Image (cartoon, rainbow, N blue to C red):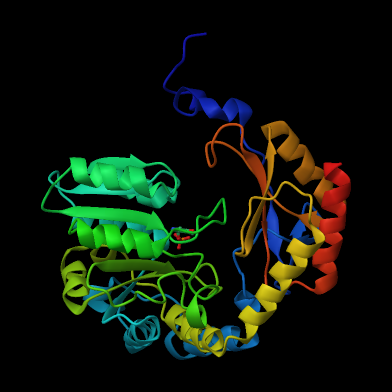
Amino acid sequence: MPSSPHLSRHWFPELASARQRHFLASTQQGVFIDVKGKHLINFSSNDYLGLRTHPQVKAAAIESIEALGFGSGGSRLVCGDHPQMHQLEAELATWKGYESCLMLGSGVLANLGLMQAMSDRHTHVFSDKLNHASLVDGVRLSGAKSHRFNHLDMVMLAEQLEKNPAQKRIIVSDGVFSMDGDCADVERLLALAEQHQALLMIDDAHGTGCLGEHYKGLTANFSGHGSLLEVGTFGKAFGGYGAFILGTHEFIEGLRQRMRTMIYSTALPAAIPAAMLASLALIQTGRLQQTLHKNIQTFLQHSQGLPLIASQTAIQPLLIGSDSEALSMAHKLREEGFFVPAIRPPTVREGTARLRITLSAAHRDDDIKQLATVLKRLCR
Ligand SMILES: *Cc1c(COP(=O)(O)O)cnc(C)c1O
C-alpha cells in the first residue's frame, strides 16, 4: 500500500516496532516504583541521593506553594522572576566556585539555548561522540560547524583543534556520561581549551552533588576558570526539576540578554528554587553522598564477574549486547522484584544494549545485595 500522509506510519515508521510503554506510578518512598501493578525496587532513577522524597525538600515546596501559588505566571524577564531564584543562583555560584549562575527550565533547554546563544556559522564546536542528546541537538540547531571526536579521545580532539583554527571555538563534553557512567578528563580538556584558546563547556548533570571534592562535581578543582562554562541540572542528585548554567559574570549576563530558551519560556514555579535550596543545603552536608558511595562499593563487591562497564559513579551499566536479550533480562528482573530498564539503540550504539543500573543513597544494603545475586544467576 502506498504510504499516505494521513497515516501515522507515514510520519512515524518506527511505530510498527514501538518501544514498550510502562505506566509508572512513583510511590512516596523514593526507592520503590509501581509498574503494571507490581511493587518493585527501583534501580533506574537519577534520584541518586533520595532527595526527590526528602521531607525537607517537600516541605520547602509546599510552603512556597501555600505562600505564592503554583505557576510563575510569566517568563523571567516579564513577571515570572522570584527572589528565591536569585538566592538559589547566588548560592549555587558560591558553592560551585563560579562568579555567576543562571537558572532555567530544564537541562535540555539549557543546552539548546546555550549552544544557540554561543554560536553562528563561524563557530566551531568540538563534541564527544557520546554527549547527551540535548548537546547533539543544540549544536545542530545552532548552525555551528560541528566536529565530533571519539569518546574520551583527547588525541583526536587535539588534532581537530589544530586543523580548525577559528575565532570562536567551543569544546563540549558531558562530565559523567549518562549511559556509560564513565567520566570526562576535565583537566586535560581544560588544558586543550587553554592551549587552543577555546572555551570548554562541561555538562555535569550526573556529577554535581555526587562526585568530586565536597561533591561539587567533576569540575570541583577547576571552577571559576575563565575558559570554563558549566551546565548542571536539578533533575538528578537534587531530586527536582530545572537546570542552571555557571560561568563568569559577563558570560552569564550575555546569556541573560540572548538566550531564547530562557527569554521566551515560562519561568519555573517558585516552589522549585525553594525546594532546590533545601536540596542544596542537604547536599552540602555530604551525609547522603557517604551512603551513596558505600552503596556503590557494596554493589561492586557483590557483582564481581558480571559484565559491568567499569564505573565508580552511581551509574553501573551491565553490558548485554543484543536488544532482545537486554529486554528479556529487564523482564526477568521485574519478575524478581527489581526495576532496571533495558537501554537500546539509538540511545546507545548498535550491539551495546545494556541494563542501566543506577544506585541511590535511598537503597538499603539488602536491596543491593539481592540485586547482585539475581543478576549473577540470570547472567550465568
Ligand atoms: C538529564 C540530562 C540532561 C537533561 O536535563 P533535563 O533537566 O532532564 O532536561 C542534559 N544533559 C545531561 C548530561 C543529562 O544527563
Q: Front-most of 98 and 297?
A: 297
Image x and y of residue 243, in percent: 40, 69
Image x and y of residue 181, in percent: 57, 56
- Residue 322 visible in the picture: yes
For the point 57% across and 51% down, the residue is 180
Image quadrant in which you'd find residue 160: top left
Horizontal arrangement in the rendering, residue 341 relative to residue 66 (left or right): right
Would you place residue 306 above or below residue 44 in this image? above
Q: Front-most of 174 and 186?
A: 186
For the point 51% across and 87% down, the residue is 284
For the point 47% across and 73% down, the residue is 217
Horizontal arrangement in the rendering, residue 265 relative to residue 321 (left or right): left
Residue extending furthest toward the top: 1
Image x and y of residue 210, in percent: 55, 73
Image x and y of residue 204, in percent: 44, 65
Q: Front-most of 34 and 184?
A: 184
Image quadrant in which you'd find residue 311: bottom right
- Residue 144 visible in the picture: no
For the point 71% across and 75% down, the residue is 294
Horizontal arrangement in the rendering, residue 24 relative to residue 166 (left or right): right
